[in-house]
Every structure is written in structure tokens, then in C-alpha cells.
Amino acid sequence: MKKIVILGASGSIGTQTLDVVKQHPSALRCLGISVGQNIPWLFEHLKNHHYDLVVVQDEFDAKSLALFYPNQTFSFGSEGLVELACLNDAEVVVNALVGFAGLVPTLKAIEAKKDIALANKETLVVAGEMVMAKVHEHQVNLRPIDSEHSAILQALQGNDFKAVKRLIVTASGGSFRDKTREELREVTVEDALKHPNWSMGKKITIDSATLVNKAFEVIEAHHLFNLPYEQIDVIVHKQSIIHSMVEYIDGSIMAQLGTPDMRVPIQYALCGPERLALDTKGLDFNAISQLDFKALDTDFYPLFPLIISAAKQGGNRMCVVNAANEAAIQLFLNNGIKYLSIETIIEDCLNHFPYASNLDIEQMVELDAKVKDYVLHQHKELS
Amino acid sequence: MKKIVILGASGSIGTQTLDVVKQHPSALRCLGISVGQNIPWLFEHLKNHHYDLVVVQDEFDAKSLALFYPNQTFSFGSEGLVELACLNDAEVVVNALVGFAGLVPTLKAIEAKKDIALANKETLVVAGEMVMAKVHEHQVNLRPIDSEHSAILQALQGNDFKAVKRLIVTASGGSFRDKTREELREVTVEDALKHPNWSMGKKITIDSATLVNKAFEVIEAHHLFNLPYEQIDVIVHKQSIIHSMVEYIDGSIMAQLGTPDMRVPIQYALCGPERLALDTKGLDFNAISQLDFKALDTDFYPLFPLIISAAKQGGNRMCVVNAANEAAIQLFLNNGIKYLSIETIIEDCLNHFPYASNLDIEQMVELDAKVKDYVLHQHKELS
């Protein structure tokens, strides 16, 4: 029986994690959850569930809910999140928060010797070295909840890591893969949110369209598997059936394939390498008929090489990129800027904020806020 | 340092095994080889190699070679093969013989407690239960040299076998996959020997065209992995890039991919799960562009369901099928019958030779000879 808590329980990953827990009552138990502002969901959910701790964003919500559920303990805000991440009996913290907000709870959970099941990729993107150093220091496991990294983990299973030649991360190409650069000028938020293969949260769907998501995944893989960027390749595979691959020095490539069901990597992060039966729809090869591959077109996706190059520079570069990206997406989703401005904003921020290294966590939090503030004020009227 | 002997060293698998040995002088050493009738090859090969034992088919060849290589020990015939299979210092016997002839040396090697690297699939097809029982009795390892079974072995690596849902064996469809049944009436030996993806021996290339090879692989997988036929599926994948797959109960499918280089499964059979660097050409996904899948058309390949059904009946059925197939291919290669007569011959033999069970090895050898004799005499003029 593994005891878990879920940060970000009402989102796409959070609800699917709850479903995995429900399917394996003898293997998994959820002790606590956090929810941001989706109080209607939480209100309904608590009718049938009781937790050791429930955390929401606002104090008002916590207090209101407590009136309806007097036997349930509530907490709130960033302190509540840390409290949940460090909950005494929890063994695994599922971090399904969106964006930079996921970083501090991850660090605190690691310090409290919790294993981490990480869906929040910004944690490793912004502070990969710091996080992995803490993982080793406190000897905890950090396992990815991401179809790509889960595929790599599965393709590494039972193999000697020294025999790895390279990782091959597959990319669907996102919502706009069949458009021209010219057409990208006029795409709408609605267009951007139509991912061809996966049903996901808004931010990650936009990140998939810009390929920021794929750049982040490469960076995440670099930290998770401790491999240089030169050994991590990306290939466009529009069906998203092969979730990623590992090539070995003997010429063999091991791949993990499946339907686009995030519960598979969630379950693998929680229970792997053990595989438990899941009520997922198996792949039907007769229905698939074909899998396509093509090289990544970096002219079409200029943010990909820009971000990988920033990641190689290290220091504060990815903190700047990530904050700029989060703020730009927020503006785009609110129809404040055009789609292609996401690119110019990230580039501008990399120029505007000078390189610095060895940031501690407080300096990162400060820089994150400064960059976001800069974007929201400078670029609001850029579109 | 693993010491091996190779039965059938001058064939496609044999020469590639020698190449693998050559690439890893500190990991592998070949103590002895056998060659059938390819004496010119052997004569050249022995100029640069010395073995503890060299076996040929005919006594005359053994004696002639001994005149040229007086410091080399030679032996001959089926007794020589068994002598080689049981060679004292050898740890692994690579069985790259073609056809039923591979069975007895395999059994003798197992009894002599040698591990087996098995390219001779007829061994398991004809006598799977007997062979696997001996493998367990003598506690040796039997590892497949076959891209499909090697892929399955690799896809099982590090996983609990109890979590396997099914094996998915890929099939290229063979030389005639783009023809109609009508066109098959007039195909020639030359046409049949043009395999679209793999460069292999003649017999296996014909078996690929008729899909007998795929039926044999399913039967081999059934014995090797101890799974019922209902858990072994075949899918047509014409590029032969995905060599086979394992589907697990959590919905994940693990696949092994690679170029059509038999040295990869040979090396994995000898050294796996350890992976050693091999000078093989890696897969270039940009060059692949697409992978296709379609259901197996059993109307086009009637031998596939016929043979699987015979295998399920067990007893002497697969001994009859295999002998009929070997004899029919011999006739076809000698232009004695038409291509489609391979089908009618196998079907006829299954009807002609009555079902019997619990055959011992002598009875199998006898039945094999009887069936072949029947085919060669009955069907010679059938075309």
C-alpha cells in the first residue's frame, strides 16, 4: 500500500491520478489533495471522499468549505501546499501543479524525504540541477509523469544505463503542425487549444503548439537521466503512438507505445516497474495503419533551438524563459497578444534580463516574479 | 569470456555470428565450427582461423581438409555435429543449422548442459515440448536468434512476466506481399528469393513468402515464452523496423526497433541482457518516414492458419508439417514444383499421415524421413 498526496488534484493529471488510485485500492491510497480555484469540483468531490488534509489557494475558500465539511481539515495558500507536500504519512508526492508554482513544494517534499511523481515539468526546467542535487542528497526517487519520460524510463528498464547511446523524444508537432508560418500570424486561442492527439490542460497545449513543451521535455530528460544534450534527439511523430525511445550501443532501439492515456505514465510513476492492470483501451494496430516520422523543422518552431541553447548556457536562463513563457501564455489565453508574440516575448526577455549564475531559490522566485511583471507590463499592447 | 561453438558456420547466421565474435575478442571466443558442404568457404576460412574442432558433412571432405591443415582436428557427419555440440569447454552452442537436422544436436547439447543460442527454429517447431522440458531438466538457457523473438526478449527485460497481456509478432509479408493469389500461380524461384527487407538463407526466404516462417515463429514463441496461442498475435508491418512487441496489462507496449541486421539478435542471444557496442548502422528516422501496419490476410496466406491449427493439435502434427515443408521447398528450389504446390503438399501430408502423440526422438526422425520421402515421390510430377 503506497500512500500519496496530490498537488493539483482537479486538473487533468490530478483527476486521472485519482482514477488510478480508485482502480487500485489495495496498492494506492490518497491521503491529501490540493486544488487551486476549482472549488465547485472540490465541493462535489468531498461529498464522497475524506482526506487527512485538503488545501486550496484562498483562505476564504478554505473557511467556506470547512462550514460544509466540518470533519475535514483544510489549509490554504503556498504554506498549505508545503504542508501537504510534507504530510507525515505520505510516501509519494504527486506534483501536478502548473508552472513555476510547482518548484518550492517539490523541494520541500524532497527535503521531507518524500518520493516525487512529477508532472510539473517547470520544476526541472527552471531548477534541474538544484532539484536533482537534493534528490541525491536525500536519496529519494523522482519519477516523471509525462508520456515521453515514462516511455524512456520503461525503455531503460532492465538495461545498463552505460549502454545508452541516445534518447529519442517524439513530438506530435502540436495544434499548428500543418500550418505555414504565415498562417500562424492569425491563429486564435481556440485553434491553439485543439491538440490533435492529447486532451490536456491549456498551458501545456499551448506549449505543445510552440514546441516549448518539447524543449522543456528535452531539458527535463537531460536532468532526469543525467545525459548531455547531444545524446537527446527529437523526432516529429504526429500520431503520438510511440511515446519515446532509447537507442543502445548495440543498435537496438527500445520504444514504448500506447494510446494517449496519461493514466498509464501516472500509474507507472506510482507503481513502476511493477505493472498493474489498468482499464485502458489497448492499441489497435489494424486501426493505426501507419506511423509517420519527420525531422523537426526548427524554422517553423524557432523557440525550440532558442530554448535548448538557453538551457545549455544554464544559470538563470531557463528561469527567464519559463517566466516569460508563462506570462506570455497568460496574455495569449486572455486574448491580450497574438500567438507569435509568445516567441518575441521570450526572445526579448532573454535579451532584457542579463545572465547570472548560482541563484538560490529565493533569487529564482524573485526573478520569476520580475520577468512576469516585465512581460505583463511591456507586452500587453504589443499585439 | 564466453566460449561458443557454431553449428552451421558458413551460412548467413553462422558468418554473422563469427563477425560478432570478431568484434568482441575479450567477451567471446569460438572453439569450434561446423560446415555442411561449403568446403571452399571453409578452406579459405581455415587459413586464418584455428579451432579445437571443425566438423563437415562428408568423411571425404574431412580427410581432404586434414591433408591441407594437419594441425587442425576434423570430424564429420551427424556424429561429428553431436561431438561439436557437446565439446567440453564450450558454454554456448549456436545452432544455425537449417531444418529438422538441427533437432538432435540441440537435444544433445542441452543434455551436455550447454546453453543454446537457437537460430534453428524447426527445433522448437517440431519438438517444442520435448526441448523445453529438457531445458528445464538440465537448467540451461535457451535464447532465440531471431529478430522477432529477440525483440520480445528485450521487451520483456526488467518486466514481470505475469504482467504480459500478449506478444505481437510483426511480419513483413515476404516476397509476394504485393501480389494477388492469381499472380502467385506463376511466380518463380528467383522471385521468391527476393525478400524485401532481409538478406537470409534460401529456405527461410521461401518460408517468409509463404508465411510458414511466421507460423513457425508463433509456435516458437509459444514454447519459448510458455504462452497460449491466444496471447500471441501477428501484425503485418512491411518495413520490418519494429521487430516485435510485448503488450502489458497496464496498456503499455514495449517494442524493439532496428535496422535489419541479424548481428544484433545474435549478439543479444550471446551476451544479453548486457549490450555491447556493435558496428551496426543505427536507425535513421528521417529516412524511415513511415511505418505501416495491417491485419494478416489469412486468405492470401492460407498456410498460416493451417499450421497454427496443426500446432494446437500437437502430437506429430508439426513434425509432418515441417517435413512436408522442407521437402516441398527443396522441390520448389529445384524447379520441380510450382510455388503454390508448397501449400497443397503440406495440406496433403497432414491428411495422409495420421495423428499420433507422444513420439520419442527416434520416432520423430523416422516420421520426418517418411514424410519427406512421400513428398519427393508423390509430388515430384504434381506441378
Image: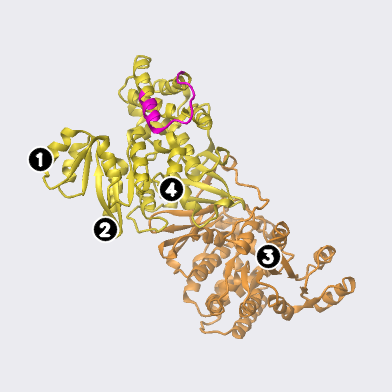
Chain colours: A orange, B yellow
The question of residue B367 being in magenta is answered with yes
- The residues bearing labels 3 and 1 have C-alpha atoms spaced at a distance of 73 Å
Residues at discs 3 and 1 both on one chain:
no
Q: What residue span does the magenta drawing correspond to?
A: B352-369
Which residue is label 4 attached to? Answer: B150
Lower position in the chain sequence, tag 4 or tag 2: 2
Q: Where is residue B99 in the image (x, y as percent from the top left)?
A: 35, 33
A188 to the left or right of B59: right
Q: Where is residue A354 in the image (x, y as percent from the top left)?
A: 53, 82
B74 to the left or right of B303: left
Specify the amino acid type for callout 4. Answer: Ser
Which residue is label 3 attached to? Answer: A1
Depth check, front residue: B381 or B290: B381
- The residues bearing labels 1 and 2 have C-alpha atoms spaced at a distance of 29 Å
Q: In which quarter of the image is the C terminus of chain A?
A: bottom right
Residues at discs 3 and 2 both on one chain:
no
Specify the amino acid type for callout 3. Answer: Met
